[in-house]
Amino acid sequence: MKLYLKIWRQFDTSSKGEMTDYEIDNVSEHMSFLEMLDLLNESLIHKKERVIEFDHDCREGICGQCGVMIDGRAHGPLKNTTTCQLHMRSFKDGDTIYIEPFRAKAFPVLRDLKIDRSAFDKIITAGGFIGAATGQAPEANSIPISYETAEASFDAAACIGCGACVATCKNASAALFTGAKITHLALLPQGKIEASKRVLTMVQQMDAEGFGNCSDTRACEIECPQSISILSIAKMNYEYSKAILLRK
Amino acid sequence: MIDSKIPEGPLAEKWSHYKAKAKLVNPANRKKLNIIVVGTGLAGASCAASLAEQGYNIKSFCFQDSARRAHSVAAQGGVNAAKNYKNDGDSTFRMFYDTIKGGDFRSREANVYRLAECSAQLIDHAVAQGVPFAREYAGYLNNRSFGGVQVSRTFYARGQTGQQLLLGAYQALLRQVSLGKVDLNTRHEMLELVVIDGKAKGIIARNMETGAIERHAADAVVLASGGYGKVYYLSTLAMGCNSSAIWRAHKKGAFMAGVSWIQFHPTSLPQHGENQSKLTLMSESLRNDGRIWVPKTAGDDRNPNTIPEEERDYYLERKYPSFGNLAPRDISSRAAKEQIDAGHGVGPMKNAIYLDFSDAIRAQGKDKIEAKYSNLFAMYEKITGINAYKEPMLISPSAHFTMGGLWVDYELMTTIPGLFALGEANFADHGANRLGANSLLQACVDGYFIAPYTIPNYLSGELNTPKIDTSHPAFDEAEKTVQSQLNRFLSSKGTLSTDYFHKKIGRLLYEKCGLSRSKQKLEKALEEIKTLKASFEKDLLITGDDKLNSELEKAGRIADYIELAELMCHDALQREESCGAHFREEYQTADGEAVRNDTDFCYVSAWEWKGKEQLPELHKEPLVFESVELAVRSYK
């Protein structure tokens, strides 16, 4: 198929970017969206032009490194799918496709479609862990955890940190990302001891990074490649209120 | 010349003896010592976190935009541990034996025993970190069986075990960042090792965001940069996985071992076209219920559902009746290739075999199959557009895991003092074939439980050596090497892209140094690589600038891949036997089984770089088996 692409080109964080038009032919419906971009880049190289920079790595939907806005939607037209798992059969011959970076104040553009998501790492650094040093662990089965608890914890732990939740949110809120980590750890008995301290420091960091507030539109849940529920946000709010009330 | 430093004493006591005698560094002195760790996958993150917890200063590097994205994240199936929670006869010795046998008796007894010995502790630690492993209803940890062993020792977290273990290690790493003990450098790529007075003392790294070339000095350097299966271009690996860190260390004097031992995973999705970049893995667990077959008549392109039972060849069940569809990876992959090469391949490119669930659906009901594999079936449909409940899956073998890597001794130290290699980057524990669910284990055990003992043992001797400054001439020289290579790429005036060369070298290796090899093919491959090398020198075209530039990044990796490919072929050519993943067509039985030669090849091949135009030099580390009998590895 032949496609008309409008792609965001931006030289660096401080430059002004703009949409640039490209045409691409001979796109097979079996190609992934990123392979279509590979093909376009190959043609740019032959024209001695600078390639379009975009982030990607595993190309199997788990590393969380890829992610662009496609026709205004985070990771494109499919629900709960990463950009790398989107295939060209979702488009048809003659389509015009708009491709932009994930946009948020906390995610500055580095070049073209590549963004800086280190704000996420900073939120985790602020307390998204259990302080178990190597060597301290007791026998694994000495802490039974019910099947349901382990599954619920996993549901939240499955987050891949791609940032689609932020990109799709009109407030650019990181509540789903932060709530998922808080839920993962707060549900487990091992994580309960640090739960109050954790939620306070992580929420504080989330705000400091410049993410917006959650206004409960549920847009994040629809795009999340791991289908993480906004109940994680409720859990974060619950843990937060509890921590504030019990703060000494 | 090469000393594996295996401790004295009975097999089961070697590691405790080592730990009891290893030299320590006083807590007050640890903060005076700096360690560089390249890679933030399971091996790198766990090692960096554990050493930081002890009090050392760590500089950690990864090329991804976050440490959480290292390719350990993609491992699906599970992690093995000899906990014997199922009371089904597992033990450290049994796990050791399975791994030695699975590796076709081409690994070191002492290393493999230690791997099994440390496995139980890893599960304890991961649970303490909050890794949500699968549980039974009573709350205890669940297990499943995996990859052709007779016990259930695999711990798992749905189909995302690697992700969950990695998040545990990543969080432990970031905790140390918060405590100021780890300086984490993301979007950085190591481009050179700095060796001073014969010891590893630092690296040159490139900041991939700004293009800045940086010097980093340390008292020891750890490479945990993963495997190089991506050399085949089409593989199950991430696009950025590369061999550059270990290859550049190799060129600085670290030996490479088992270089051509690459595992081809039997159940990945087949290639569908020329522009494909990746072969997605479908979990091996599918082989518990799927039956593998091809049409008996070569070239039969009827719809699979219309091919009658008597015209199908369930070749794994036919050839290996006792293991059937669950034969180990090397054997299953090779059998698939045999069928495809004989014209029985199916699918649009005739490069696949069928993995058929219709019998399982009939016997167990669609609900049961859905409950077990719905995520995999959904992924399959997302990628191929085919509903596997109605039609058999098309699958094919693809390059997956590198058993080979930097040669390391029992302490995981390379032939360069002060340079350590962990996880998939070293060659150590899997011999010529890795068992399923042992790679996560090895990466974690290396990083959490081995390096934190062996690196201090080395560092205790470094306290009194003078501190190296990054203004040392060795840093000037290393930086110059890096800079001149980058300049050469940026001024390239050819017409061909990096991907063109990557696909070329990948195809060449796949055909001549892939699932099966022969003297004739390998000699041909070496000739072709020479031509490709020359073409890369003059025909490459890199556009863009010296700042953020993914083409520039790829160029360096491909230059290394081409040299690595050459060594892979030398390694495969020299080893005149078939063992594990290394199948030499000349050395097989009448019915196509591998013939190992313990009389002449019971050693590890460790290769030394002798220079660009020189042949590499082989060093042999004899493999001595004291606790197991060398046996023919049969799965019939």
Image (cartoon, coloured by chain):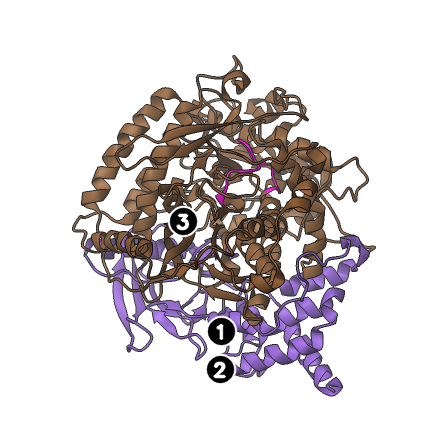
Chain colours: A purple, B brown
Q: Nearer the viewer, residue B533 or A169?
A: B533
The label shown at residue A210 is 2
Q: Position of residue B603 (x, y in %)?
A: 51, 26
Q: What subunit carries mark 1?
A: A
Q: Height in image: B253 above or below B548?
A: above
Q: What subunit carries mark 2?
A: A
Foreground tag (2 vs 3): 3
Q: Position of residue B549 (x, y in %)?
A: 30, 60
Q: Which residue is mark 3?
A: B245
Specify the segment rendered in magenta.
B425-438
Element carrying mark 2: loop
Q: What subunit carries mark 3?
A: B
Under mark 2, the amino acid is: Gly
Q: Residue at x 44, y 34 (%)?
A: B259
Q: Position of residue A144 (x, y in %)?
A: 80, 58
Q: Quadrant of the C terminus of chain B?
A: top right
Element carrying mark 1: helix
Q: Decide: few, some or many residues near mark 2? Use Cα within 10 Å; few <14, some 14-19, many ≥20.
A: some
Query: In the displayed structure, does residue B167 sit left or right of residue B588?
Result: right
Under mark 3, the amino acid is: Ala
Q: Which residue is mark 1?
A: A119
Q: Decide: few, some or many residues near mark 1? Use Cα within 10 Å; few <14, some 14-19, many ≥20.
A: some
Determine the CA span between mark 3 and mark 1.
27 Å
| Residue sitting at the far left | B493
Whether residues under marks 2 and 3 lie with C-beta atoms below 8 angstroms apart, the answer is: no
